Amino acid sequence: MPTAFIPPDYFRRYGVAEIFGRGAECEVDLGCGDGGFLMAVAQQHPDRLYLGVERLLGRLRKVCSRADRLGLQNVRGVRAESRYFLEWMLEPASVRRLHYLFPDPWPKEKHHKKRLVQKEIVPVLHRVLTPEGELLFRTDHAGYYEWVCECMEDAGLFERAEWTDLDSYPSSDFQRQWESQGRLIYSARYIRKA
């Protein structure tokens, strides 16, 4: 099965078995970029299924080529805007973990509406996650960190939890870049309430 998942119809929902050819749940890397984190975590956990969502075609092609070269049968990539994919294309309760790592924080106030996490997206995150599924969020931007935490906590659909395995969690390229510049990294883990 090819690494790139090309939906035959962008106006219907897809389950994990249709995307991967097997399985009932997967983990999703939202805005997977060049796939550094995705490749590392897929190699670390070959028994799990990982889907990278990326809107930029060039980046997604590189991710899929890299996964193919590494022989990663547990990776798929889809070209889509993250919000649309979550809201309209994923079957409910099909994602065990959402990885939302170092997204563009859109720091100017007039651009805040471009941020993926908004109050109205939190119920969508709740819907696509399996019972006790989780959102793992990391950023170097204090303002966006506070924004996401506020949106998640105000919705009442998730419980904040300690992130105990941070040391074994693979780094993304952006994380390594920001850490090399001495920036603080903010991390949050939210578990879906029933």
Image (cartoon, rainbow, N blue to C red):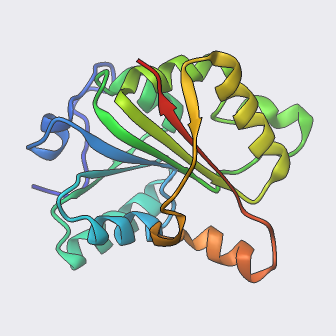
131 in relation to 59, above or below: above
Residue 53, x across and y down, in percent:
42, 47
154 in relation to 36, above or below: above
Residue 37, x across and y down, in percent:
45, 66
The number of callouts visible is 0
Q: Residue furthest right?
A: 109
Instruction: Tell me if 193 is positioned left or right of 145 in this view.
Output: left
Which quarter of the figure is the C terminus placed in? top left
Q: Residue furthest bottom?
A: 180
Is 27 or 194 nearer to us in this picture? 194
Is 21 or 183 nearer to us in this picture? 183
Instruction: Tell me if 52 is positioned left or right of 190 in this view.
Output: left
- Residue at 16% in and 35% down: 24
53 in relation to 171, above or below: above
Is 7 or 151 nearer to us in this picture? 151
- Residue at 73% in and 72% down: 178
- Residue at 23% in and 78% down: 70
Quadrant in which residue 155 is drawn: top right
Which quarter of the figure is the N terminus placed in? bottom left
Residue 30, x across and y down, in percent:
49, 46
Instruction: Tell me if 107 is positioned left or right of 71 in this view.
Output: right
Instruction: Tell me if 143 is positioned left or right of 194 in this view.
Output: right
- Residue at 30% in and 25% down: 93
Residue 79, x across and y down, in percent:
39, 46
